[in-house]
């Protein structure tokens, strides 16, 4: 794909490439030749090497110290089509550098200092009639420098200007780039683009991410296919509504902005992927025609201060402002403020396959009225305020493609009884952190009756079930009959009584989450396919023996009550496991051979190894610092020392007191003498 040719090599990548180049190819001076390619990366070169074959077509000189590309540098290589000079501190291209480079197609100048002598460099660039790929990223270029450099460079199709210092673009910025197809402007300082792309009718992909744009109004680039304007400060996206053309736009990324309204999309478009995550977007249908708010304005106008040709007026509460969303396949609205979908909104997307709604403010979800498309494959409404879900047989039966359904972290206490059993292709359900139980007895599966529990039996397509933190109390013995779960998450249901419910899953389960369930003695020997087991936060004082017969790869035993691991068990576990979590246990430093067993086994990773602690008779240590432990033998001799030292200290103390007392009278006497035994003068 041509896009890749724009990408400058990353430091690591090119070094890696040098290190791994096969030594079977001939070298000329510092360069390695592979057919007509000369690889001279990272050779501390200060100029273009001279002795390379004259028919060299590709020359890679990344990561060298070439400061100036001289008039004569490339004279020897008239067949060059690709030249890469990324990361060279290059300041200047002398104006005659490319006098004979009429075949040069791709020029990578990323990560240099072309802001220094850009006027002369611009003369050089004009001599490249065949140039199609130009990478000028990370060169400290400002607006006028870019205009100068690109003047009369008409042949460019792929241009990378990312990581420069552009602030403002206008119609002169890219005026001569009539063939431009792809433009990367990410990571600049742009706060305004004013008619900048009017001379680039062939532009297909435009990246404006990580800039300071406050809005995109009057969007009228009908030929653009991909627009990435993520990570800006955009409050409004408004496309020109009066155009009678179909916009070619397929992907629009407006995530991480400040949108307050759903973007005003073109009324005819081909938009398939719409990314709107992390904005403050919501719908305002309830405000339209609302008599209680007589004076609230219903339109917003944007005036273009230079030329009032492009005033934009938008009917704020108008339904049609969402534009054409009929081709949408992915709609990402994560992290917004959506409380409800406007009437008919979901129905306008007949081929929607992924809807990401997590972290919004939805309160109800009515499958009957929303009428989701039968192509819906993934529905994520986690972390909302859902307290009601309603559905009917008919609409659920139509959701035959729904495979991933995430309802976790809501306020659900009731759920339509047949919700999951009606979804013929459902593979993964996450109901974690809701107050929904597992049904004790067989209940009717009328979808329109609500139930506070789910009957999971015989949902044959289901593979992954998450019911973490659902305040589960009892799971009936036959709860999972007829299921082929590979993944069951029951963690954070402290005290849950599981009866024999897991037995029917013993053949299929690969992951089992039982963290913080206060489970004590479950027999795992039948779980032959179990690969990953979470037993954290369960006050376990020993590792279940039955685990030795399971072919586990990942075991989480953190935050339990383990003081040691019997050496035999440690050997068996270490030989099978790949990852083990053991932090937060009150291990005994003086019974830590198991640790050395795990440590010595190269195939197992102790997660947070240096944070596993143990205690000896004096204090807590990191279990890896075994030289600091005071264990029995050591402590015994320490005791002896103390016993020996105490009498010595005592006798020294006694002697000191005696000496003091013996000395004290003398002192008294002396002063006494001084004071009262003065020689008399009589
Ligand atoms: C443009 O250059 C930047 C940094 O040099 C790079 O990360 C990005 O992938 C390039 N863009 C394209 C479209 O290759
Ligand atoms: C490079 O060539 C240009 C055009 O002939 C000339 O003006 C300039 O002085 C030359 N530069 C050097 C360093 O010789
Ligand atoms: C060129 O850009 C760099 C930052 O990329 C900056 O430090 C330097 O001062 C700039 N030089 C000129 C002449 O603008
Ligand atoms: C660009 O091209 C036009 C027309 O070919 C010419 O008049 C103008 O001088 C050129 N500008 C530069 C800076 O080369
Ligand atoms: C938009 O650009 C950002 C930053 O480069 C990138 O992370 C994101 O994946 C892009 N979006 C799309 C849809 O490609
Ligand atoms: C838009 O195009 C349709 C047919 O393509 C035509 O009937 C209609 O008059 C056009 N409207 C305008 C405003 O040009
Ligand atoms: C008018 O606004 C109020 C308050 O936002 C809302 O409760 C009510 O449903 C709205 N009426 C209509 C007709 O949408
Ligand atoms: C609505 O606007 C009118 C005229 O501007 C004003 O007299 C009235 O007090 C306003 N009503 C409200 C509720 O703000
Ligand atoms: C745009 O708005 C300005 C200010 O209200 C007005 O003077 C101008 O006529 C408007 N232009 C158009 C084309 O509507
Ligand atoms: C769901 O929508 C249907 C159709 O609009 C309606 O009949 C039903 O009452 C709604 N259910 C709830 C609980 O609002
Ligand atoms: C799944 O979606 C496709 C379209 O993407 C549709 O043709 C098919 O009928 C759907 N399958 C079911 C079982 O609904
Ligand atoms: C819904 O479907 C279930 C079986 O899937 C059936 O037992 C029940 O009668 C249906 N309910 C309605 C209201 O059609």
Image (cartoon, rainbow, N blue to C red):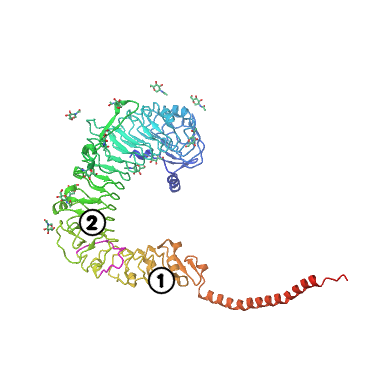
Q: Can the viewer see residue 283?
A: yes
Q: Is residue 114 above or below residue 581?
A: above
| Residue 304 image offset from top left, x and y in percent | 33, 29
The quarter of the picture showing ligand 5:
top left
| Disc with the residue nearer the chain's start (2 vs 1) | 2
Q: Residues within 10 Å of mark 2 (few under 14, many from 20)?
A: some
Instruction: Name the element at disc 1.
Output: loop
Residue toward you, 96 or 391 = 391
Q: Is residue 484 above or below residue 164?
A: below
Left or right of 64, for residue 401: left
Left or right of 569, for residue 91: right
| Residue 277 image offset from top left, x and y in percent | 31, 45
Snapshot quadrant of residue 511:
bottom left
Instruction: Name the element at disc 2.
Output: loop
Q: Residues within 10 Å of mark 1 (few under 14, many from 20)?
A: some
Q: Which residues make up the magenta segment?
A: 482-498
Residue toward you, 440 or 311 = 311
The residue identified by callout 1 is: 565
Q: Is residue 342 above or below residue 132?
A: below
Q: Which mark is residue 427?
A: 2
Label 1 near label 2: C-beta < 8 Å?
no
Snapshot quadrant of residue 272:
top left
Residue at 29% in and 58% down: 433
Residue at 68% in and 76% down: 657
Quadrant where the image shows the C terminus: bottom right
């Amino acid at each position: 794909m041509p896009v890749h040719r724009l990408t400058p090599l990353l430091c690591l990548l090119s070094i890696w490439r040098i290190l791994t180049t096969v030594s079977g190819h001939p070298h000329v001076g510092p360069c390695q030749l592979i057919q007509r390619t000369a690889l001279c990366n990272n050779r501390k070169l200060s100029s273009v090497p001279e002795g390379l074959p004259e028919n060299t077509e590709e020359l890679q000189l990344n990561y060298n110290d070439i400061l100036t590309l001289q008039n004569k540098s490339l004279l020897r290589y008239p067949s060059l089509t690709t030249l890469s000079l990324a990361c060279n501190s290059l300041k200047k291209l002398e104006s005659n550098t490319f006098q004979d480079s009429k075949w040069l197609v791709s020029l990578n100048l990323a990560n240099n200092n072309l802001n220094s002598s850009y006027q002369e460099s611009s003369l050089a660039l004009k001599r490249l009639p065949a140039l199609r790929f130009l990478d000028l990223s990370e060169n400290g270029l400002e607006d006028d420098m870019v205009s100068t450099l690109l003047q009369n460079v008409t042949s460019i199709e792929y241009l990378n200007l990312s990581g420069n210092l552009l602030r403002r673009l206008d119609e002169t910025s890219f005026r001569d780039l009539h063939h431009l197809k792809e433009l990367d402007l990410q990571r600049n300082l742009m706060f305004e683009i004013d008619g900048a792309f009017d001379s680039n009718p062939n532009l297909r992909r435009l990246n404006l991410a990580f800039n300071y744009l406050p809005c995109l109004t009057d969007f009228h680039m009908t030929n653009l296919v991909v627009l990435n304007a993520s990570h800006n400060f955009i409050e409004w996206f408004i496309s020109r509504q009066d155009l009678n053309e179909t916009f070619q736009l397929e992907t629009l990324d407006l995530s991480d902005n400040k949108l307050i309204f759903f973007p005003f999309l073109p009324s005819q478009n081909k938009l398939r992927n719409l990314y709107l995550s992390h904005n403050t977007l919501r719908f305002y249908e309830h405000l339209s025609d609302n008599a209680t708010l007589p004076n609230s304005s219903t339109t917003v106008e944007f005036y273009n201060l230079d030329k009032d040709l492009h005033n934009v007026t938008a009917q704020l509460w108008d339904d049609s402002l969402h534009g054409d969303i009929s081709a949408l396949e992915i709609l990402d609205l994560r992290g917004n403020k959506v409380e409800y979908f406007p009437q008919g909104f979901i129905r306008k997307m007949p081929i929607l396959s992924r809807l990401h709604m997590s972290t919004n403010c939805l309160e109800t979800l009515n499958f009957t009225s929303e009428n989701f498309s039968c192509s819906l494959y993934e529905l994520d409404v986690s972390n909302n305020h859902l307290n009601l879900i309603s559905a009917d047989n008919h609409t659920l039966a139509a959701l035959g493609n729904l495979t991933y359904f995430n309802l976790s972290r809501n306020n659900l206490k009731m759920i339509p009884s047949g919700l999951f059993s009606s979804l013929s292709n459902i593979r993964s359900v996450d109901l974690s952190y809701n107050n929904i139980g597992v049904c004790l007895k067989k209940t009717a599966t009328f979808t329109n009756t609500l139930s506070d529990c789910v009957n999971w039996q015989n949902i044959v397509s289901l593979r992954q079930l998450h019911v973490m933190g659902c305040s589960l109390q009892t799971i009936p013995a036959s709860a999972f009959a007829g299921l082929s779960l590979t993944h069951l998450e029951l963690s954070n249901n402290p005290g849950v009584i599981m009866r024999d419910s897991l037995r029917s899953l013993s053949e299929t389960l690969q992951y089992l989450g039982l963290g913080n369930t206060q489970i004590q003695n479950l027999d795992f020997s039948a779980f032959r396919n179990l690969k990953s087991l979470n037993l954290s936060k369960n006050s376990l004082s020993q590792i279940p023996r039955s685990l030795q017969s399971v072919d586990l790869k990942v075991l989480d035993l953190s935050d339990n009550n383990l003081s040691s691991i019997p050496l035999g068990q440690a050997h068996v576990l270490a030989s099978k496991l790949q990852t083990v979590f053991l932090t937060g246990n009150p291990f005994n430093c003086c019974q830590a051979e198991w640790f050395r067993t795990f440590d010595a086994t190269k195939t197992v990773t102790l997660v947070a190894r240096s944070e596993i602690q143990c205690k000896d008779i004096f204090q807590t240590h990191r279990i890896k610092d075994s030289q600091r432990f005071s264990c029995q033998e050591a402590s015994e001799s320490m005791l002896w020392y103390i016993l020996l030292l105490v009498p010595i200290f005592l006798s020294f103390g006694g002697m000191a007191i005696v000496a003091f007392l013996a000395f004290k009278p003398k002192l008294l006497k002396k002063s006494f003498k001084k004071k009262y035994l003065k020689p008399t003068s009589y």
